Image (tube, rainbow, N blue to C red):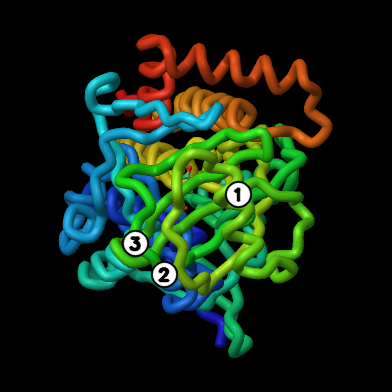
Amino acid sequence: MNAAVRTQVAIVGAGPAGLVLSHLLAEAGIASVVIDSRSREEIESTIRAGILEQGTVDLLAGIPGSRVHSVGSRHDGIELRFDGAGHRIDFTGLAGRSVWLFPQHEALRDLIAARVASGQDLRFGWTATAIEGADGERPRVIATDDAGGALAIEADFVVGADGSRSVVRRAISGSHDGFFREYPFGWFGILCEAPPSADELIYSNSPDGFALISQRSPTVQRMYFQCDPDADADAMSDAQIWDALQTRVPGHALIEGPIFQRDVLRLRSFVARTLRQGRLAIVGDAAHTVPPTGAKGMNLAVADVVLLARALEELLLRSDAHLIDAWADAALDRIWKAQHFSWWMTSMLHVAPGATEFDRRRQLGELRTVASSEAGRTYLAEGYTGWPLG
Ligand code: PHB
């Protein structure tokens, strides 16, 4: 049951970063093998957020069969709420760009279908266990499957798009070597059957904490409210959840409906110290985590691999190491901007446990500064809709 395959780029992880990378490499004529420990069904059914920047949408729209324009919906702004009133941040007017709401699992379904249709070597149910030859010209990914099979993928380059518990990161720099922050609050998230409570997403600050009113479709809505990171998602009744949400969006009546999923998310920021070493690199959640308040996660993953694909093209097709040597710094430039934006949105909107009356009034001063000044609103609009890739 031991098998060995040889390819140009071995990609560990079939999430947005790994699949978009394999697509971009194939377009450049570079072969890759993609493995993921999960099944195709699991990847396609895990519901995750999906606010896509214009650049991400343009890239996805160019992939055959993409439904980003038909299933996704364009959002030209958000509402920032505080002190009981809403303030629209007009993305198109302020930054000349929009975002799209297209849930990540829908994007993944499209990407997997497109990769399979074009003959991509894509293997589900294979768990990478080690990276061998990390210092040489021919690194190898060692993987196993549930049936006791073993696979060695020898490649010119190995990319870890394998999420926050990345095996490739461990081979580069040790598993947690990097810059880390854990926030003293989490998000209690629900999915419910109801029409949208508003046309656009609402990011609301209130004396009781933050709430986000998001959407999934005309009949399913996603909402979150700030909670203890150790909260038990099953400990609240539906009525208590609606009360918590409504209290955090004062002045705007939410449309309630049956809640069919609930979860508690922890909020973290992380950037790995080393993104590349020799012929290994990490991208997406393997390289960084952002709190969800800035809606940056998937966009940052796509930006990493757009830059990496260009660098691998130079390296593997023209033996030019110029771009790969500059890649980590180029990626980190955007990653730290997104880290700052996500941290800023998070701290501006949440109420930290133990916040004093000074903290609270200062925060309202900040929110009023942003909402009342065109420069403030433009800063938010530019960060949220994403910086051009250059
Ligand atoms: C979501 O719809 O799940 C969502 C939207 C915007 C965010 C975070 C999550 O900033």
Q: How far apart are marks 2 and 3 (CA)?
A: 7 Å
Image disc number at residue 195: 3
Q: In this view, does 332 lie above or below 293?
A: above
Furthest residue toward right: 354
Helix, strand, or loop for circle 1?
Answer: strand
Q: Distance between the residues labelled 1 and 3?
A: 19 Å
- What residue is disc 2 on? 193
Q: Ligand 1 within 8 A of label 1's CB?
A: no
Q: In this view, does 231 lie above or below 279?
A: below
Sequence-first tag of 1 and 2: 2
Q: Ligand 1 within 8 A of label 3's CB?
A: no
Residue 285 visible: yes
For badge 3, the amino acid type reads Pro
- What residue is disc 1 on? 225
For badge 1, the amino acid type reads Phe
Sequence-first tag of 1 and 3: 3
Point out the frontmost of discs 1 and 3: 3
Answer few, some or many: residues within 10 Å of disc 3's Cα (few below 14, many 20 plus, some between 14 and 19): some
Quadrant containing the N terminus is bottom right
Q: Distance between the residues labelled 1 and 2?
A: 17 Å
Give the x, y percent position of residue 176: 74, 44
For badge 2, the amino acid type reads Glu
The structure residue drawn at horizontal position 44% and vertical position 72%, both measured from the top left corner, is 45
The picture quadrant where one finds residue 145 is bottom right
The picture quadrant where one finds residue 356 is top right
Quadrant containing the C terminus is top left
The structure residue drawn at horizontal position 60% and vertical position 77%, both measured from the top left corner, is 144
Give the x, y percent position of residue 320: 36, 30
Residue 322 visible: no
Helix, strand, or loop for circle 2?
Answer: strand
